[in-house]
């Protein structure tokens, strides 16, 4: 009789982190605020498109944003794509649209898309320029790429490391990368203004105790704590972020924030 196999602690921790993320996406103020912003902006972008326009979310993950696109993009060919089969399995619990497993560097270009979304994906990729160039080939001329990324390298912390980030972006830096990859960038703004001072202070306090929490397990626990939904605080922050939605949908540029929202157009 063979001995039972033991799961590596790191693998168990990553699986637990994925499960916690899936649960947090439904209630956590940050995910809900970001979804509302994306929904408002996408609604304005697709308003003038012809029936049957094609929309793709690259790196759709658990389907958290894709379900918003399903509500907003009516009468369209909408699909989600991700490299990880387990994330697509989780996404299927939330959406009905087609899901594809694949690499964004191998996007089909036979039927180019009118709109492609990448929501907090680019910061995970080692070569962001190669990714943006590949996505550009899957867009129609004049097609739009809508993306969000974390802002300000000064906010870098254990949270970025545990989330698998390679970088955070400045507004000027993101605009430059997009232009170098063949896009016009008519709009780029920071958002999540309320989060910036809170994150800045939290990162500084966490850095003071970093030596005491330097091991990977402690770092992961700190990261998981940020996904915890505290009802009173969660509701307050959600309401404080609501005022950003109409401003961003109208094309206003906010002066500061913990995230960036950019709309780029294939030349």
Image (cartoon, rainbow, N blue to C red):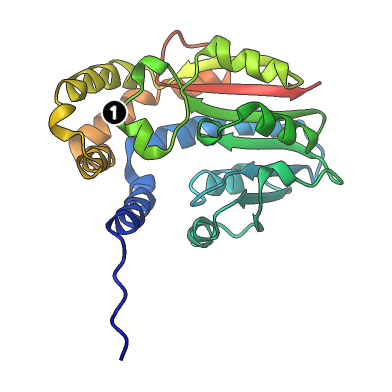
Q: Quadrant of residue 262?
A: top right
Give how far across and how far down residue 248 sits, in percent: 53, 19
- At a point 55% along the width and 60% down the height, the residue shown is 85
Residue 33 sits above or below residue 216 on the image: above
Q: Is residue 215 left or right of residue 81?
A: left
Above or below, comparing residue 183 to residue 125 in the picture: above
Query: Which residue sits furthest front?
Result: 2
Residue 73 at least partly seen: no
- Left-right relation of 68 to 129: left
Task: Residue under label 1, please give it.
Answer: 237
Give the farthest residue toward the right. 110
Q: Considering the numbered disc 1 on the image, is that residue within a helix, a strand or a loop?
A: helix
| Of the pair 218 and 87, the residue shown nearer to us | 218
Which residue lies at the image location 80% right of the left edge and 44% below the top edge?
A: 51
**Image spot of residue 166 (x, y percent):** 47, 30
Q: Nearer the viewer, residue 205 or 119?
A: 205
Camera-side residue: 189 or 267? 267
Q: Can the viewer see residue 113 in this picture?
A: yes
x, y percent for residue 75: 73, 49
Q: Residue at x 66, y 48 (%)?
A: 103
- The local crowd at label 1, few if under 14, some if 14 to 19, many if 20 or more residues have their Cα within 10 Å, is some
Position in image of residue 48 (x %, y %):
76, 31
- Counting every numbered tag in the picture gives 1
């Amino acid at each position: 009789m063979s001995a039972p196999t033991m799961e590596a602690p790191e693998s168990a921790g990553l699986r637990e982190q994925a499960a916690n993320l899936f649960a947090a996406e439904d209630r956590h103020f940050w995910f809900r605020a970001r979804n509302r912003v994306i929904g408002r902006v996408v609604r304005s972008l697709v308003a003038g498109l012809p029936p049957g326009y094609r929309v793709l979310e690259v790196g759709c993950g658990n389907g958290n944003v894709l379900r918003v696109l399903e509500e907003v993009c009516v009468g369209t060919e909408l699909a989600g794509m991700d490299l990880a089969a387990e994330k697509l399995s989780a996404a299927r619990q939330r959406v009905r649209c087609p899901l594809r497993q694949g690499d964004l560097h191998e996007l089909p270009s036979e039927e180019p898309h009118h709109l492609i979304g990448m929501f907090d994906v680019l910061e995970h990729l080692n070569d962001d320029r190669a990714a943006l160039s590949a996505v550009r080939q899957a867009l129609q001329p004049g097609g739009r790429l809508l993306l969000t990324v974390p802002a300000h390298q000064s906010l870098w912390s254990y949270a970025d490391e545990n989330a698998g980030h390679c970088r955070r972006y400045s507004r000027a830096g993101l605009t430059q990368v997009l232009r170098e990859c063949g896009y016009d960038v008519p709009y780029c703004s920071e958002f999540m203004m309320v989060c910036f001072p809170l994150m800045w202070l939290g990162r500084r306090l966490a850095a003071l105790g970093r030596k005491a929490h330097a091991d990977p397990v402690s770092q992961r626990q700190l990261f998981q704590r940020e996904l915890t939904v505290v009802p009173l605080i969660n509701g307050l922050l959600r309401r404080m972020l609501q005022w950003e939605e109409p401003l961003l949908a109208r094309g206003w540029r906010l002066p500061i924030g913990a995230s960036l929202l950019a709309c780029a157009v294939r030349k």
